[in-house]
Amino acid sequence: MKKILVTGGAGFIGSNLCERLLDENCSVICLDNLFTGKIENIQHLLSNPNFEFVEHDVVDPFSAKVDEIYNLACPASPPHYQFDPIKTFKTSVLGVLNMLELAQSCGARILQASTSEVYGDPKVHPQKETYWGNVNINGIRSCYDEGKRAAETLMCDFHRQNKIDIKIIRIFNTYGPRMDENDGRVVSNFIVQALKGEDITVYGDGTQTRSFCFVDDLIEGMIRMMNSENFTGPVNLGNDSERTINEFAQNILKITGSNSKIVYRPLPSDDPTQRRPDLTLAAEKLNWRPKTSLHDGLLKTIDYFKLKIKG
Ligand code: NAD
Ligand code: UDP
């Protein structure tokens, strides 16, 4: 039985990943400091003898004997990663360093959850992995963007210098059940606002674009990447169906049948104007493409939030 460490395992993507790995008969250690993650996300897994939760901060070294490490620990929503930007940077950089040293000590393969944010406010569209990005070094998003870029650098240097078996994925905006209702990201904000009949808050003029991927599709891509041979990445994982934030707000209003009004709020600084993954490499190397339409993914996510809001 494969023994797998998932850092950030009590978060949105991490808890979905732990569940899938247990379904595949792996033994899972879920490590999390519960900053944005919640025990509630993994409550249903705690009685599984193949599952262990460890409350731990990745900024501090960790030792275990595992075959694979998925390094996801890091707040992902702008309000959360901007809450304590110094801690966010440490989490990305010291976190991956500790996990690489752990991989080295036990000969494990390690996958790093990088992000489309490494492309910053991209001047090349759609974004291919060969694009080096357009990132502000000093802005309010830099703690996250530059932390993730530095983490990729460390992964590649440990691979070249110490022959560590690495995998890098660049995740584009992902949504689905177990997103935190107060997370501050656009998908959770708009759904919760629509369900509660509150105003839908579009930041800026709503012409900026994003491409939203359903979490089950992402998890499939992550596992294929971990199991791939002779390929370190980086590889983009996401959905290439792009829409403006205005269109997205209309989608949510239509699917929820809500009468909420759309209101416009100031655009946060350095908010990327466009984002869409080029998925050619993922198709070629992993034989992977996202399968879930935005409509079907949103129906599942809306059902989840309906239950949460009811309590
Ligand atoms: P999330 O906030 O739900 O999960 C992050 C998890 O990491 C939480 O459980 C949190 O408590 C934990 N964590 C944070 N700092 C930690 C620390 N110092 N030590 C231990 N645990 C810590 O966010 P998510 O959307 O599930 O994101 C998971 C990973 O995927 C992150 O690395 C994020 O950067 C990456 N990612 C996500 C998206 C997305 O759209 N969701 C896009 C790009 C990249
Ligand atoms: N956004 C918005 N209203 C909200 C939350 C976010 O219009 O209530 C916008 C945000 O400015 C950005 C896009 O939606 O342009 C996606 O934001 P999110 O925080 O989900 O992800 P990211 O900016 O990291 O891609």
Image (cartoon, rainbow, N blue to C red):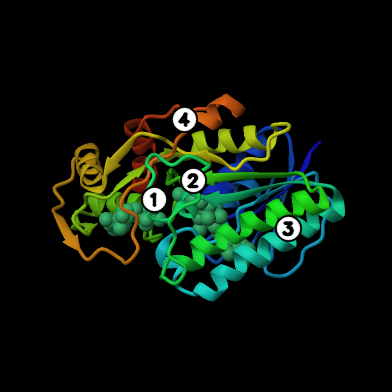
Asked if 204 appears above or below 237 in the picture, the reply is below
**Labels 2 and 1: the sequence-earlier one:** 1
Say few, some or many: other residues with alpha carbon within 10 Å of mark 3 (under 14 / 14 to 19 / 20 or more).
many
**Labels 4 and 3: the sequence-earlier one:** 3
Q: Which mark is residue 290?
A: 4
Say few, some or many: other residues with alpha carbon within 10 Å of mark 1 (under 14 / 14 to 19 / 20 or more).
many
Image quadrant where one finds the N terminus: top right
Residue at 63% x, 32% y is 224
The one of 51 and 3 positioned closer to us in this rendering? 3
Q: The disc labelled 4 sits on which kind of residue?
A: Pro
Q: Position of residue 83 (x, y in %)?
A: 45, 73
Residue highlighted by disc 2: 131
Side (left or right) of 250 relative to 3 = left
Q: The disc labelled 2 sits on which kind of residue?
A: Tyr
Side (left or right) of 35 relative to 183 = right
Q: What element does badge 2 sit on? A: loop
Q: Position of residue 30 (x, y in %)?
A: 68, 53
Q: Label 3 vs label 1: CA separation?
A: 29 Å
Q: Label 2 vs label 1: CA separation?
A: 9 Å
Side (left or right) of 87 relative to 76 = right
Residue highlighted by disc 3: 99
Quadrant in which ligand 2 is drawn: bottom left
